[in-house]
Amino acid sequence: MSDAQKKDTAEQAEFRAYCQDWLAANHPGRPPVKIPQGALELSDPDALAWLKIWQKSAYDAGLIGCDYPVEVGGGGKTNCQAIANAEMQRAKTPYLPNIIGMGMAAPTVFFHAQDEVKQELLPKLLSGEHIWCQGFSEPGAGSDLANQQTFAARDGDNWVINGHKVWTSLAHFADWMILLCRTDKDDKYNGLSYFVVPIKEALDKGVTVRPLIKLTGETGFNEVLFDDFVIEDRYRLDEVGKGWAVAMTTLAHERGAGPLVTPSSGGMSLEEGKSVSTNNPLSLIDLAKNQPRDGKTAADNDVIRDDIMKLLIRREAMVQNGRRAAVPELTDHPMRIALQGKLVATELNQDMAELAYQIEGMASSLYVNDDSAPMGGQWPLSYMNSFGVTIAAGANEVQRNILGERVLGLPKSK
Amino acid sequence: MSTQAKNFGFGEDETMLRDSARKFFTDNASADKIHRLVASDPNIHRSIDCVWDQSLWQQIVDLGWTAVCVPEAAGGIGMPTVAAVALAEEVGRVAFPSPLLSTFNATFVLNHCQSEAATLALGEIAEGKATTLALTNSVGSWQASDSDVTVNADGSLSGSAYFVQDAKKVAQFVVSANTDKGLGLYLVDSAATGLTIIADGIIDLTRDQAHLEFSQASAIELAAPGTGVAAIEAAMPAILSIVSADMVGAGEWLLQTTVEYAKTRIQFDRPLGFFQAVKHPLVNVMLDIDRARSLTYNAACAYDSGNDDALKCAHMAKAQAGDMAVFSASRAVQFHGGIGFTWECFVHLFFKRQMHNQVLFGDAKQHRALLANIVMGAAA
């Protein structure tokens, strides 16, 4: 019996057993189409469709949105989402496609929208029937997120929106967008407001989505242009001018530091017969043992061994930090560990992928379009894609500012 | 694998003990006071003295801290290792000169000796008899089987033990010594005839260290020949947790002290901490401390749970703590600027303690190599 199981409440224990039974009978099996490494790289509609069926079935079974109230389409349980997540991971399920919806939009809508809007939007968000995207970044508002130029002008019971959003993952599939924009040009932080907008139904009617191509050659994110797009006032979250505070709810959950646990599944290997996990340093050991180097294997090289151990230690520290963060007496500042999450996870991922392609040696030069590429070229691809997450959601330089200022109390760098 | 507590075993008693220790040190061991005590003579060729506050040590004994990890059956309190780890973290936070951590380490080894003599020694520790380990040979090897001491036919010891911590503060030594039947462990009183304690001149002002010369020194057998290595190795996860905890505490003092300085020191019309060249490395120090702290609690908890992985967890903790120790200390000196390079700035006490800690019981590279042997198998 694992540590987690031992500490389950009666409700949690019953739910865990239910999840295990359901997953044993309802795992969707191998995908009929090629699935990219993560939901943010989705570009094939067939891959999305298959993943949406998985999310819907897991939602219908009660494994997604467990901790949200029943009135908004949730399961009405207490602290059960983490259990469903763990059991889905253990069952090696596919990932969920609506990750921005569940990770960022859902908690923001839940904490800031009117009740009728919550009831309208959250059920189809949690079921994955509606895919969501995030309209925060702009050409002039990246790390300096509050420098929003997209403008919403009041027009009776409506707002008219004009502006330009960039790096918008999943916008090409999205039904809805969470949108941060300016409603007052004279006040940087108090001049922002927050909306949810149905972009798919407005395509070519005030909303244009254009794909951007990443340095890997993959699509997956976009730019979104608003040209006199009209949205009803009821889709505004919280008060006019309170957009920055609402955005903080979104960002806290994006960094894993919000009160609601994001539904997530995963664990399924992407390539049949290949167990490459690009987020566990143990997979580097297997890689090294199978990679010739200097007449032996890479696993016999002392420098490589030392480098792998450094990453293994960082990974274990992440796990143990998570364990310690749950014990208030053992954390000096309530946000000290929570606010480190995004930074340490994304940098570990990047460093793992970098070491992996170095272990692969010359063969790492082969890309995913070459059948001889080791592991289907996943490691060098993972390395290149890793910059997406060290930059996104507040570049890690901004994360270090946040930690330095909010946790250590150092003066603000602006 | 045994079940491990979600809170690493930090129950109410452990937290209370930690909080009372923090108060005790806040009241009695300010950096200013410690500096006046141990750093009165900056002369690089100063005489080798052991300076410490024995009245404070007596208070620590009266508080019962030496009894924390002594089993109840041997007259102790029998708390989990995390309790000692909590105390070690507080000791590190004030760079406190005392034989407490050495006494913990000796306790862990004695707990694995399974002899009547060991039980008696544990009882004496519970009552406050400071004890330290003498396990290291002339090249400073941490291999349990390496010893330059041998047991004579009459049971006395001859030879030398090196790099013995807190040697001038303790009343007795747990010594590893060779016999033709393998390594055994022996208790030697600090006043024993045939024992000479030769103090080392060391960088760390908050500790003392010595090499011991045994010339037919009388000794009591604690672990029979052939059982000494197992006893030392069994205790090693706990020992590594203790030294890592000291490093975590010292690291946190270095971080917080440097943060305070960076908030108040003005250059270019701004506090230093405004500049990201200072702010971001301080955040990196924090990340490193948190990693070390969590891994240390995990190692102690794994040891307490009898987990097969305990040694692996301990290698991770000490490796991380080792790198963190260097980093926290180097950034503290660097960001204090000119004043940080002087003897009058308290930072050097902690800087030097971290240098010492880094190599004590093996450095980061060594522990990563040992970890690799466990998780990857030995290299071809």
Image (cartoon, coloured by chain):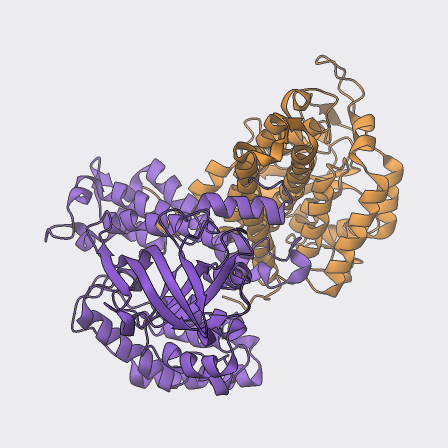
Chain colours: A purple, B orange
Q: Nearer the viewer, residue B350 or A121?
A: A121
Q: Residue at x 54, y 76 (%)?
A: A79
Q: Is residue A218 visible?
A: yes
Q: Nearer the viewer, residue B53 or B189?
A: B53
Image quarter hosting the C terminus of chain A? top right
Residue farthest left in this picture:
A371
| B355 horizontally vs A47: left or right | right
| A262 horizontally vs B235: left or right | left
B317, above or below B40, in the image: below
Q: How many marks?
A: 0
Q: Nearer the viewer, residue A179 or B138?
A: A179
Q: Nearer the viewer, residue B92 or A388?
A: A388
Q: Residue at x 25, y 62 (%)?
A: A208
A367, above or below B162, in the image: below
Task: Report x, y in % for residue B102.
Answer: 70, 41
Task: Report x, y in % for residue B36.
Answer: 82, 26
Q: Is residue B226 visible?
A: no
| B338 horizontally vs B31: left or right | left
**The quadrant where residue A167 appears:** bottom left
A218, above or below B357, in the image: below
Task: Report x, y in % for residue B296.
Answer: 58, 50
**The quadrant where residue B39 appears:** top right
